Image: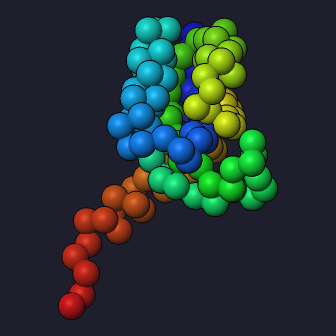
Amino acid sequence: MTNRYETVFILTPVLSEDQTKETVKKFKDLIKAGDGKVRHEESWGMRKLAYPIQKKSTGFYHLIEFESEAAFVAKLETEYRRDERIIRFLTVAMDKHHLAFAEKRRNKAKKENAEPANA
């Protein structure tokens, strides 16, 4: 039985845009290779960290929502730990309330992006 998960990871700020995209692709491909399905992904861009991590005060945030077997999450997190470009990560299982909230947030973002600005 597959579960729905949401993972957020922070990439080191010294990466170029191409290196950032390559890292994200690596983890998306890892999910697909582990018989998972990527349902949604968001790049939150460069953000200030709440506290310095590895002497860095900013990082590139990225969110991936996916479906997979529960055992796969441990493999994914092991890969996060092995990759020196990842400075923090968090993976959580999504319950029905979390799924509803994520869907509402996505719909709101789509609506805001679709509306033309009043000029």
Q: Residue furthest bottom?
A: 119
Rendered image coloring scheme: rainbow
Task: Judge from the rendering whether residue 66 lies leftward or rightward of residue 47; answer left or right.
Answer: left
Quarter of the image with the N terminus in it: top right
Quarter of the image with the C terminus in it: bottom left
Number of labels in the image equals 0
Task: Judge from the rendering whether residue 56 lies leftward or rightward of residue 119; answer left or right.
Answer: right
Asked if residue 41 shows in the view, the reply is: no
Q: Residue furthest right?
A: 51
Nearest to the observer: residue 18 or residue 40: 18
Report x, y in % for residue 77. 67, 20
Report x, y in % for residue 82. 65, 18
Report x, y in % for residue 61. 55, 47
Nearest to the observer: residue 40 or residue 89: 89
* Residue that appears at 69% across and 50% down: 56
Nearest to the observer: residue 99 or residue 46: 46
* Residue that appears at 41% across and 18% down: 29
Quadrant hosting residue 111: bottom left
Report x, y in % for residue 109. 40, 60
Nearest to the observer: residue 79 or residue 69: 79
* Residue that appears at 26% across and 72% down: 115
111 vs 33: above or below: below
36 vs 105: above or below: above
Asked if residue 88 shows in the view, the reply is: yes
